[in-house]
Amino acid sequence: MRGINIVTLLSVFVPTVSMTHIFVYGTLKRGQPNYFRMMDAGNGKAEYCGSARTVERFPLVIAGKYNIPFLLNVPGSGDRVKGEVYSVDAQMLAFLDKFEGCPDMYQRNAVKLEVEDWAGESGPAAGSIMEAFIYSTTTYKPEWLKLPTFDSFDAYGSHGLAYIARESRN
C-alpha cells in the first residue's frame, strides 16, 4: 500500500458532515424555553458557536395569543437583533424547518451578522461580519408593525408577556 497516506484513506471511508450556521434570537437560545430542542440529539446536532447581532435592523416583536417572538422580515426597521449562532447538521436543520413552520409561518433566509464573541479557538473575530440563516416572517398582522420592538428576546423578561410553550397550548 505504498503511496497511500492515512488522511487519504480516512477521507474515503469517513463521511464528512456538512454543517450550517443558524442564528437564533428567541426561544431556542440558551436559558430559553425551547433550548432543550437544540440540545436533543434525537433532533440532530447543534453546537453553540457564539453570539452575534444582525448587521441590518429588523423588528423583533412579541405577538399572538402565545406571546411568540417574531422577527418580521422588514429590513431597516426595528433594532439590530442580538442572538446566538449555532452550527447544525442536516438533521437538525430539517427539524428546525419543521419546528419553525418553514416555509408557511417562517422563512429561512441568509442574514449578515456582526460577531460579538466566538466560542473556541478558531472562528471569526469579534467585530467581523459573517453570514448565517435566520427564521423570519413575512406573514404577520399589520398591527404587529406597531408593537414595541426588542433588540433581544427573553421569555422571562420585564416585558410581562409570558411565552406559552407548545405543550401548554390548547
Image: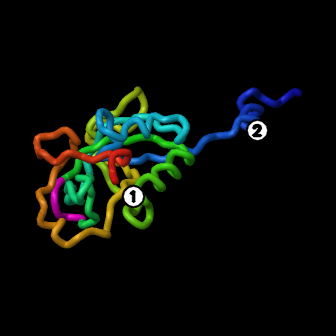
Determine the residue positioned at 19% across, 38% down. 156
In this view, the residue farthest toward the right is 1
Q: Amino acid at mark 1?
A: Ala
Q: Which residues are magenta?
A: 75-79
Q: Is residue 47 magenta?
A: no
> Which one is nearer the viewer's eye here, 74 or 105?
105
Which of labels 2 and 1 is toward the front?
Answer: 1
Which of the colour schemes (rainbow, by chain, secondary structure, one colour) is used? rainbow
Total residue callouts: 2
SS class of the residue under badge 1?
strand
Identify the residue shown where x is 38% and y is 51%.
131
| Label 2 sits on residue | 12
**Residue 33 in which image quadrant:** top left
Type of secondary structure dominating the magenta stretch: loop
Q: In which quadrant of the rendered image does the N terminus lie? A: top right
Q: Nearer the viewer, residue 58 or 10?
A: 58
Q: Which residue is mark 1?
A: 110
Q: Is residue 51 above or below residue 54?
A: above
Front-most of residues 97 and 83: 97
Residue 38 place in picture, x, y as percent: 43, 39
